[in-house]
Amino acid sequence: MTESTPPSARARAPRVQGTVRIVGAGLLGASIGHALSALGIDVALDDTSPAQLRLAVDYGAGRRAAEDDDPTLVVVAVPPDVTADVIERELTRFPRAVVTDVASVKLEPLHILRDRGVDLTHYIGSHPLAGRERGGAIAARADIFIGRPWVVCRDGETPSSDLALVEGLALDLGAMPIEMSPEDHDRAVALVSHVPQLVASLLAGRFVDAPEGSLGLAGQGVRDTTRIAASAPELWVQILGANATPVVDVLDALSADLRDVADALRAPDAPGARRAVADTIRRGNEGVERLPGKHGQNRRFEQVVVMVDDTPGQLGRLFGELGELDVNVEDLRLEHSPGAQFGLAEISVVPGAVRRAVEGLESRGWKIASTTND
Amino acid sequence: MTESTPPSARARAPRVQGTVRIVGAGLLGASIGHALSALGIDVALDDTSPAQLRLAVDYGAGRRAAEDDDPTLVVVAVPPDVTADVIERELTRFPRAVVTDVASVKLEPLHILRDRGVDLTHYIGSHPLAGRERGGAIAARADIFIGRPWVVCRDGETPSSDLALVEGLALDLGAMPIEMSPEDHDRAVALVSHVPQLVASLLAGRFVDAPEGSLGLAGQGVRDTTRIAASAPELWVQILGANATPVVDVLDALSADLRDVADALRAPDAPGARRAVADTIRRGNEGVERLPGKHGQNRRFEQVVVMVDDTPGQLGRLFGELGELDVNVEDLRLEHSPGAQFGLAEISVVPGAVRRAVEGLESRGWKIASTTND
């Protein structure tokens, strides 16, 4: 575990000033603490779990909160089911501070707080689209927000200075602040996060009673499709419950699509049946194309696949020589087949570097398995 | 494009002898041709497309088939919709040869051939679970079968010498022959391949009409879940049509599961509703655990995440030093956030090497972001 400065922040002075109080020292809270502390900002950590708090402090996410703290900003990073309560408590306790939260559903806490008549002038909901497969203070890392969207839900009454402070927090952590209404946010995460989680879980759920032999035929495709099915239930039950309506809307639409394609396969000779199946795959092509790539807008990398002997030092030689060729590796994946004496290193480089990489490597005796401009 | 010898085969003499005739010089046919040619086996290629055939021959997948060829083995690697016709033709034309095919559905061609009263004594259906995202002779590669399952569907009447020949083909290519009935095979691929494809396509299809902003919140999870939605429609329409019944069975079960969880979210206070949602995620955990890992049975690698400056040569230094530390990298993934000045290299190593890797790298000034035994 280590603390590191988001490079985008390293460049200039932090936008956030004064003391930042973080309630909840889990993965997100502690990660924000690491990043802010690295920027020299005074971070006061609080958590109902003494063990979690001790860990976060020991790892350098900040100091323990003190009675006389006077924070300019309070970040509520607690589980969804207690988010509204903690927001209300913090607003009452620190009337001069701006209070934000990082919960992954934005409408439900807002409704609860409005129903209670809480003054929300200085509350701004937000949601950093960041995380890791492992949770807790111990998995916290200062860099998880870099390049990720950070949704900020401004409200009519929100003073723009408050908004600037929360957006400044996102920018200080290297994230991209995006203004959205709570309604749009919740519909968006239902579509791109909550329903995909359920779909992966439901599909993987079909494997529970499958004969061992059939699962032996599984390849990379189904592994990717069901990877997130490994997520922990506790948090997801809360998230799905808190965002039920938008999630159910997408599920119902998906359910209808699924029935249509099943019916088409059941009666292949019915008018339009074959076409319905083809359209399902075609719409999928179209939809997946709309997703931003791993590199955000920049999906324009070319892949060069190099054969590498499966012995220590080979990758070292490869990347050393790529360095000599002044080829920067943007992304990389090593395919390693069981029983094989070699692996295939798929290297992503900017298009301008493909020729240099291929010719340079081949002249140095490397075998190029393929390139995307084959 | 390059041709390479499966190392598992390099060791000893090939099991397949004589001339192997391959009908269909696409990705699978040409890849089999490359691997067999590299083993010194006489490969006779045939294809209805002169251009495809020329490419495969030029790239070294084999020679053009001749009138007087007398193959010991015929491999039918044509699209599903013509597979049965070509199998029948080859059985008639080469009565002394064993004929196999590599189609991804096994029962339908068998039914067609039986209905036509074709003598199937020397036909053995097979299915190598191998492929690439790109198709065609140009994407062919000798190594795509290494470590992959290769299903062989033996029939009652099959002489064991014929079976041995087809299993020998799989072994010569570095694949793992698995005997299965056509029924079991088709049910298995419906579950682990055909339905996952449809599910990914249906989910991605929901993105077609989604507001741009909502897709901007997409992360790695949904990208993985929908990656295979990019597959080409033509082939999938044939595959799904040919395996409709088993696919529909899984779709119906999935559809019911989906409706149940939607109902549970619609009426969260109904008895058992919250539990139903939790069970969906939990069953997903259980199911995904049953999938064989990327390394087959061996999923016991530990991950070490190292921070790497995003400059040429850095990875070279890292892997060079891992080589010095005698740490073999089993698998590797580079996470590169847009806007970040550094990437995170997630390295998979055998558990015994974690400590050596971490201590050795840290002593050389590397920052370890995390290890799986955090």
Image (cartoon, coloured by chain):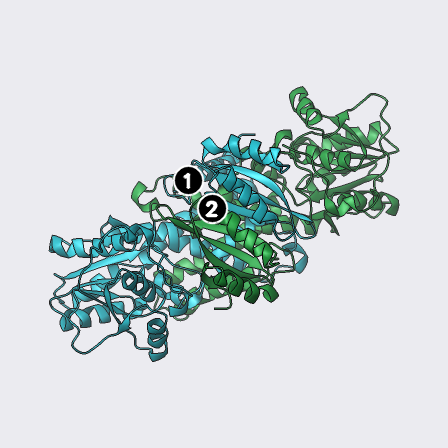
Chain colours: A cyan, B green
Image: A232 above or below A47 = above
Q: CA distance from mark 1 to mark 2?
A: 9 Å
x, y percent for residue B262 = 40, 58
Q: Which residue is mark 2?
A: B226
Q: Are marks 1 and 2 in contact (CB under 8 Å)?
A: yes
Q: Amino acid at mark 2?
A: Thr
* A47 vs B155, nearest the viewer: A47
- Of B184 and B269, the residue lying toward us: B184
User: Which of the 4 image quadrants contains residue B350?
Assistant: bottom right
Q: Chain of mark 1?
A: A
Residue A31 seen by the camera: yes
Left or right: A229 as drawn, with respect to A95 = right
Residue receiving disc 1: A287
Callout 1 crowding tier (Cα within 10 Å): few <14, some 14–19, many ≥20: many
The residue shown at (48%, 38%) is A327
Q: Secondary structure at mark 1?
A: helix
Q: From the top left corner, tell me how far across and down residue B64 is, in percent.
A: 76, 23
Q: What residue is shown at x 66% (from left), y 22% (from top)?
A: B49
Residue B117 to residue A227: above or below: above
Within 10 Å of the Cα at label 2, are there few (<14), some (14-19), or many (20+) other Cα atoms?
A: many
Residue B290: x %, y % from top left: 59, 61
Question: Which quadrant is the N terminus of chain A positioned in?
Answer: bottom left
Q: Amino acid at mark 1?
A: Gly
